[in-house]
Amino acid sequence: MSKEPTMRRAIFACVIPLLLLLGIGEAAAHALLDRAEPRVGNTVATAPSEVTLWFTQKLEAAFSSMTVTDSAGQRVDTGKARVSGSQMSVSLRGGGAGIYRVNWRVLSVDAHRTEGNFTVQVGR
Ligand SMILES: [Cu+2]
């Protein structure tokens, strides 16, 4: 056996965990949207009374917020979002049919800021 394959194997053994640590590990450490209720892109019959988001990491309540707007761009949320651990909810005042957009912006406990938005269709 030559030394080269062993060396190569040793390099791979080092590089792959390093890439995981720098790339995937770092991304996974941020607070990304895990799931939502109503579900992202889903259609619901009537306007929900509340939107709840679950993140991949705990949130800093003071620096995390969300708004919900209707098709006309009008706010349909009642104001301040409630944060509990990795979960954030906001109540809705009710509204008509249309495409509702949920906009979220959070600061996770590792001090990284992430934001995003998605839509839910209300009615047909
Ligand atoms: Cu992070």
Image (cartoon, grey):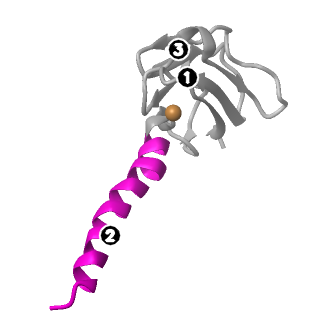
Mark 1 to mark 3: distance in Å? Answer: 8 Å
Which residue corresponds to mark 1? Answer: 111
Earlier sequence position, callout 3 versus callout 2: 2
Outermost residue, left direction?
A: 1
Q: Position of residue 23 (x, y in %)?
A: 48, 51
Residue at 55% over, 42% down: 40
What is the magenta range? 1-28
Local crowd size for mark 2, using a 10 Å CA cut-off: few (<14), some (14–19), many (≥20): few
Which residue corresponds to mark 3? Answer: 60
Q: Is residue 70 above or below residue 41?
A: above
Q: Amino acid at mark 2?
A: Phe
Q: Is mark 1 within 8 Å of ligand 1?
A: yes
Identify the element where label 3 is drawn: loop
Q: Position of residue 14 (x, y in %)?
A: 32, 61
Which residue corresponds to mark 2? Answer: 12
**Secondary structure that dominates the magenta span:** helix
Residue at 72% over, 19% down: 76
